[in-house]
Amino acid sequence: MTLIRVAGNGAFQRKDVGQAYRKNAEFYQPKKNPSLAELEDLLLGNKEKEIDSNEVSAAVKEFQQMEKNKGMLDIKGPSVPVQTIGGPTPEDTIELLEEVRSTALADADPTPQELRTAATASAKIQSVQSQITLHQEATRQIEIEAKRQREDEAAISNRSVQYDHQPPEVRGENVQKRRFIEQAIAKYSLQVHLKKYGFTDQQPSFFRIA
């Protein structure tokens, strides 16, 4: 079929309808027109599904990474220094620090930052352990002192009873002996204490018990 169109200058132009149809069909082939292919996918819903699937997958991966980072924040994140980590008790603090150290050294080839984190955690563990030991020793000394005071009070009470039944001269002699004994014990305790902390008593001491 042939169409005839009159041009503006009055000339006749012939145009083959079949040829125009073939050119039109070639233009609308998806392979030769990527924009048309994308438009067709969008109209059919394929492109939207593909985009949604990629976005959902990316969002899931991002959420999982955020959760992982959130779990590690308290022990490896720069916003939480190791020195600020602490629990309700010294024992709980040591447990948290041991977890920090284990996590920092979990990788086969830890980074310098992870090595520093582990070293800092180890140092603080030793410090907290020293505090626990000092607290235990102080508690033990308090218990020993309380027991000694109870024993001294009982002994004084017994001596008071015996003292009341002694002659005056015997009482005076016993008081003097007890005084010399107490002075000797006090001097000996002081020397032991000084020696323990690296001091020495250079002055000679003489005691004579009457």
Image (cartoon, rainbow, N blue to C red):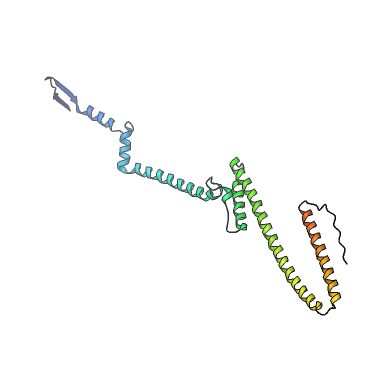
Residue 183, position as x, y percentages in the image: 81, 63
**Residue 111 seen in this snapshot:** no
**Quarter of the image containing the C terminus?**
bottom right
In the image, residue 121 sits, relative to residue 207, either above or below, namely above
Residue 44 visible, this angle = yes
Q: Residue furthest left?
A: 10
Could you say which quadrant of the image residue 134 lies in? bottom right
Q: Residue at x 73, y 71 (%)?
A: 150
The quadrant of the image that shows the N terminus is: top left
Query: Which residue appears farthest toward the bottom when viewing the image?
Result: 165
Q: Nearer the viewer, residue 148 or 169?
A: 169
Left or right placement of residue 144 versus residue 41 in this view = right
> Where is residue 4 drawn, in percent x and y?
14, 25
Rendered residue at 65%/48% (across/down): 123
Q: Position of residue 70 (x, y in %)?
A: 50, 49
Nearest the eye: 35 or 205: 205
Q: Is residue 39 above or below residue 132?
A: above
In front: 24, or 66?
Answer: 66
Residue 64 in the figure: left or right of residue 136: left
Q: Residue at x 23, y 27 (%)?
A: 19
Q: Position of residue 45 (x, y in %)?
A: 32, 44
Q: How many marks?
A: 0
